[in-house]
Amino acid sequence: RRAMKRSLRLSCPFQNSCVINKSNRRHCQACRLKKCLDIGMKKELIMSDEAVELRRSLIKKKQRVPHVRTAPPTSRMTEEQEAMVRQLAEAQKKTFDSNFIYFRNYRPARRRQDPVAPHQQPPVFLMMPHINDLTTHMIKGIIDFAKIIPFFRALCMEDQIALLKGCALELCFIRFNIVFDNKTRTFSCGQFNYDSNDLAM
């Protein structure tokens, strides 16, 4: 750059046969300038001393400025979405019998450790009849929950039935998780506490 700006007449003592690379580029200015011109360097594109100094000062200034991480913008719900969440929460409160007060007329819960008469064979599915009644009670609550939601009521009857068939059991599992006691590893359903053994054959 300096040689081009000063229009210096440079000569190579080795008949312009020097190999110019990163390690020995300072050994011969003439061959170095020739290589730069051969690969397309033009005098009119060379930066002035003032431009070089300005560029250096901008780089130093940028290095001094601490990099501040900007937090991603938090997404806010629309008023319509907030209203829908309130409707769902209200429907949940009205239809989820968390204390299982209305769980009645169920078949008795028979556990594996319950005594069996000598002449009787223990049933294969001990708790299944009782669990079926419990699940039916839960599904009725899910149906009542869906009926409160305006968007669900706006659907035709066939679509309502299809949705309930497709998700009622999954919604029951979600509600069962609400009454799960992590300390005792049991589901606390009013007067009954269930564990994994209650579903074993």
Image (cartoon, helix red, strand yellow):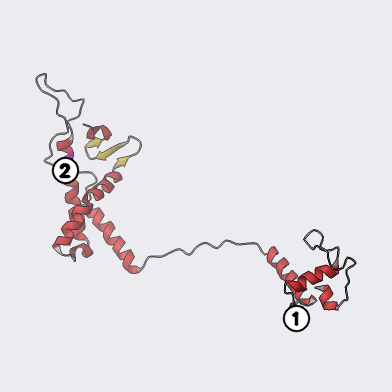
Q: Can residue 195 be seen in this view?
A: no
Q: Which amino acid does label 2 sit on?
A: Phe
Looking at this view, is 61 or 51 the one in front?
A: 51
Q: Eyeballing the image, is 161 above or below 181?
A: below
Q: Does the magenta stretch include residue 128?
A: no
Q: Is residue 56 left or right of residue 80?
A: right
Answer with the quarter of the image where residue 22 lies.
bottom right
Q: What element carries label 1?
A: helix
Label 2 Cα neighbours within 10 Å, binned few <14 / some 14-19 / many ≥20: some
Q: Nearer the viewer, residue 46 or 132?
A: 46
Residue under label 2, please give it.
103
Residue 74 seen in the figure: yes
Does residue 101 lie above or below 111 as drawn? below
Name the amino acid type tagged 1.
Glu
Q: Position of residue 36 (x, y in %)?
A: 77, 71
What is the span of residues highlighted in magenta in the rendered image?
131-136
Q: 10 Å neighbourhood of mark 1: few (<14), some, or many (≥20)?
A: few
Callout in the foreground (1, 2): 1
Nearer-the-camera pick, 28 or 180: 28
| Residue 154 position in % (x across, y down) | 19, 66
- Residue at the image position 86 percent from the left and 65 percent from the top: 28
Residue 108 pos. (x, y %): 14, 34
- Residue at image point 29% right, 63% down: 84
Residue plotted at (75% across, 69% down): 56
Residue under label 1, please give it. 44
Q: Is the magenta region chiefly helix, strand or loop?
A: helix
Asked if residue 97 lies left or right of residue 42, the reply is left
Residue extending furthest toward the right? 13
- The answer to whether residue 55 is left or right of residue 9 is left
Residue 140 position within the rendered picture, expressed as x and y whole percent measured from the top left? 16, 50
Which residue is at a point 11% across and 18% down the rendered structure image? 118
